[in-house]
Each structure stands twice: as C-alpha cells, then as structure tokens.
Amino acid sequence: MILLPANPLSLHTAKTHKPWREPIPLRNVLRLLFLLCFLPFHFPVQAAVSTLTQGYFIFSSENSPPAEELGRWNPVTLPDNWNISHPGQGGTGWYRFTFFLDHPSHDLWGIYLPRLSANAEVFANGVLVGSGGRLIEPISLNSFRPLLFSIPGGLLHPGNNIISIAILGYPNEMSGLENVQIGLATELTPRYERRSMFEVTAPITVCVLNISLSLGLFLLWKHHRAEPLYLMLALGSLCSGIYTSSFFLTEVPVQHSLWLWFIYTLAMGFSYIILLIIHRFVRVEHPLLERWAGAYTLIIPFLIAWTGPAYYLKLFGYMGASYALISPYLFYLVIRHRNTGHRIESLLLLLVLSVLAGIGVHDLDQMIFPHRHLPNYYAYWAASSMGLVITFLVILRFDRTLNRYILLNSNLNQQIEEKSQALASSYEERHALLTHNALLDERERILRDLHDGLGGYLISALALIDRMPQTTHALQKTLRTALDDLRLMVDSIDDKNGDLSLLIASVRERLDLAMDACNITLHWQVTAPPQLPNPSPSRHVQLIRMIQEIFNNVAKHSQAHHVNFILTDSFLEIRDDGIGFDPLSLKTGRGLTNLRRRAAELGLILTLRSGNHGTLIRLEWGNSGRRTAPALTYPQVWAVEYWSGQAGTGVQKQVK
C-alpha cells in the first residue's frame, strides 16, 4: 500500500510524459542486481506512515465536517499556531486533509496527533472515529498530551480519503495543530506510547512525588513549628505538584479559563516560595523584600484576571519574567553562602537554580513569543529537580545537625562527668558514712530492745522455772530453745562484717549440747571460710536454719552415734551413721520440704543420699559447679535427690 498526501482541490491525475532514456551500462545493471540481493538482509522494510502537513482550514461551529465549499476553506501548512495564523481568534477550527490509498485494506489503521490545543475530534470520510472528550465547558483538556484514534480498515477505500479534524482552541493561547500522522495502528502505537511516557506518565510520577514530599514536610513542620523552612518547603512542593497535574488531567470541574488562571497563579506562587527557601537556606533576612514580593505575587494575578482570559498567557508570562529578574540576586546569595564553608549545599542550590533558570527561560519564551510549533513546557521537570534537591538538602542538614548534637552532647557529657566525679566521690563517701552510721545505730537499738526486752523476759521465766518442780522440764527446754534462737538472731544482726564463719561458730556450742543430750558425738571440721554468694544477714540466718533443721532430724530420727560436720569455701556437708530412710517411700515431711525451699531461695544445690548405714546431706554454692558427693561406704544407697536451687525444680532418682 502507498500513502500519498494530496491536495484536496486538485484530485485530478496529472498527465504522464515519457522521458528520454539513455543506454544503461552493463556495469550499472550488475551493481543494481547486487544491491537488490543483499539490501533486504540489512535494511528491514517497515510499514509506511504518512505525515499530513498540507491541507485546508476553516472556523466553523458545526458539529460535523463542513461542506466542501472552496471559497470558505483556506490553505494551511502544519504545524499551525493560531497565535500566528489567526491572532486573537478562537473557537472550533476544522482541518481537512486528503490521502491516497492504492488498494483496499482490512487492517486496523490509526490517526496520531502528537500535539494539539486544546481538544480534538477526528472524522474519516465523514465518520467520527475518535474524540478527546467534551468540546463544551468544562471542556476536556488535551493540550499537553498526544492522541491516537483507530480507524477500521473497511472505513477507508482505494483512492482519495478525506480526514477532517475539529480543534477547539482559545484566543491567544497557542491553540492549533502540530501535525497529523496516519498509518497502520501497529506502527503508530509505539510512537504514541513513547510520547505518552514523557508527556503523561512522567508528569504523573512527578506530581505524586511532590504531593508525597509536601505531606512529609508538613508533618515535619508540625513537630518543629519553630522552623518555618519546613512549611515553605511543603507549600512549594504542593504548588509544584498541583501545577504538574495540569499536564495530565483531562477532566476538571471548572471552566478552562478559571483552571488556567489557577494553574499559572500556583506557578507564580512557587517562584515566590523559591525566594523564601533560598533566604532560609543561606540564612539571609530581607523582610522588606519578602513582603513586597509577597504582595506582588498576591495582587498581580487578580489584576490579570480582571483583564480577561485572552490575555492570561502573555501577562502571566510577563509576571514570570519579572521573577526571572531576581535570579542573579539568588545566584549571588548562594555563591556567597558557598564561601562560608557549606560547599555541598551551595553546589546543589546552584545546580537546581541553573535548571530552574534554564527551564524558566524556555517556558517563558513559549508563553510570551509565538512560534510556529505549538509550545512544549518543561516546568514539571524543574519542579521535580527542585523537590529532589530540597529533599537531599533537608537530609543533609538533619545529618549535620545530628552530628553536631552528638558532638555537643559528647563534650557536655564529658565535662559533666569530669566535674561531677569529684563531687560524686565526696558525696558517695559522705553518704556511705551516713548510711553506715545509721545501720549501726539501728542495729544497736534492735540489740538493746531484744536484750533488754524479750531476752530479759525469757531469762526471768527460766529463773522462775528453775525453782519449780521437775515437771516443768519440757517448758524449760522450750524456753531455752527460744532463748538460743533469740541469741542467734542477735548474733546475725550483730554480724557487722558479714562473716558467716563467726555465725556458724556461735551455733556450734548449742549443737554440741543438743548432740550430747542424744548421746551423739559431733565431729566438727572447717577447712576454709565459706563464700556464700550475695552474703547478707538474712541469707546467713537462712543457712543456719537449714543446719538446725538437719541436726534436729539427726537427733530425732537417725539413731546415730556419730555425725560429721564439714565446711569448705564451696560446700557444706553433714553425714551421720544412723539407720537412714527412704525419701521415695515415705511422705515428704515439713523438714525436708523446708530444706528444699530454703535451698531454692538461696540458690544452693541440695544433694541428699540415704542408706541403711547413714544419711548424707550436702549444700553447694559459688562457682564450684555441679559436684558429685563422695561415694558412701554403706552397702546400699536407697535414694539420691538433686535440687538446683531454683524454686520448684529438681531431679529425683532411685538407685537399686
């Protein structure tokens, strides 16, 4: 198939004339055959796409292509910018093109419009094949995006085909049509997708990033209201994000003129916020300049709105040019800031200001001065670069502030530590002395109370009982036991240095008397001072209670003749030569239960072995680890119990 752009007013076929032919040398024929053989392998043949640039144009409010009246249609060459070809005019303009198809086709065709303003409808041979949306207010906006419409192959016929395109445009807004491409849909779709990626997808991405950045900066400002820079950055990102949305939004709920005024007002507000941001970053205060620039940014857009929509584009362009006049001032501030030592910040600000200045000059040129081609605006790239640089600068400033804060804290902590060490040492000594004196006073008071009070009563009671008959022997024994226990308590409280050996030694005499009363010989062996973990009077009393409980059981139940008491730095061992018992066959008494509980509370390892020739009980502590008691010489061992010292845990075995 061959696509030939044609003049719609000259559809007749031109006469052909036979040219004079020269003889063709054989060498040239061979060269041609060689190229025909190898050329297809190196240059793949692509489907043809025709670009229509020559046609006719007419302003008409009709909803369908106007009739072909030669006197009303004017020749047009694309690209067509109405600010040049039809200054001050707007409305619905119709373009008419003709192309030639050499044979019928049933493939899917397409019409591709790379750029237009502001909306379009496309007709093929008088049949509507595609529309960009509403052509009445509020219109659908397609000024910054390409359009692709499909044409069924059956709608086209061999010969001349008429393509009619209706463009809705506005006066002095650079309305018009860039060019028209027609061909197979498979050829036009990649072109449309590539352009859409840059003119639709990219603005969407930039808009989302700017809006997200604005929300993050606003939340940051809420937590740091003393720093207005975050609020300015949030407002700047918000303005640039909403402005960027105009490049991809097609449906807006307001009239085109109001939307245009709103978008350009945001762009001017973004320029003003850039001034504020630069002032804050370089730490320069010019309140008078900021107030005048703020009033200018607020008042001028309303004056432009009063002039009418036909002047919006050019007047906002002049307003943007006035902001461009302060660019040298901003560059000067950043360069001066670089001399203060903030090289990275200054270089990044210079880079983003250069990008903003370059893109701003390009877009202002497109707004103020009409060109043959329809304008391409790149302000959203400037907004994205500004957002990225500002984000990096905020992170950089946070990092610098955090490092400074850490350094100051480190120095301050070091100074405080140095200054407080001297005070702390004296305070600690004084506090320790006061605490020690208070403990001594309290111990003395308790000792006096116990000795003069309860001790006196017990001694008096014993003296009275001594004068009574022998029937009071049991009561006398009980009172003596109570008195011994009271003395134990007094000794434990008076244990000022925490020496467990002295406390155990004070109990020895009482144990000797108790064993003598039962005709049991006590063999006492202390090889080293005991090192009970976490020593304290209360823990010492607990251990003494366990020793008393063991000796009480020996006196009551063992029927032994000898009992050995062995004390080292890491364990205590008590063994007798009595009749023994089987702990697994008897009900556990309160004495054995108390031993287990106290061992668990003290964190001791309790080992119990009993046989028909005696019983051994060992208490282990410290870093001695798990020790195995020496094997008994008795012929049979009934039971062995291990208790780890943790409340409620233990291992119990029976050895047969």
Image (spheres, grey):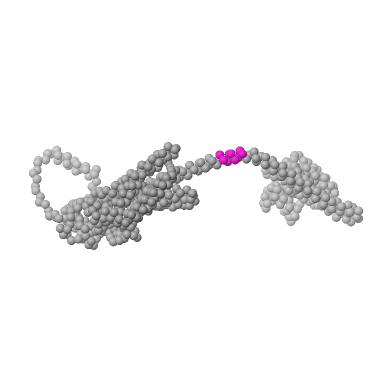
Query: Camera-side residue: 514 or 245?
Result: 245
Please give the range of residues in magenta. Answer: 411-419
Q: Quadrant of residue 97?
A: bottom left
Above or below residue 129? Residue 526 is: above
Q: Quadrant of residue 389?
A: top left
Residue at left offset 14%, top offset 38%: 27
In the image, 653: left or right of 16?
right
Residue 371 percent location from the top left of the image? 25, 48
In the image, 43: left or right of 441?
left
Residue at left offset 35%, top offset 47%: 323
Residue 120 percent location from the top left of the image? 26, 57
Q: Can see residue 531?
A: yes
Residue 304 covered by magenta stretch: no
Residue 124 percent location from the top left of the image? 22, 58
Query: Camera-side residue: 601 or 335?
Result: 335
Residue 54 percent location from the top left of the image? 19, 52
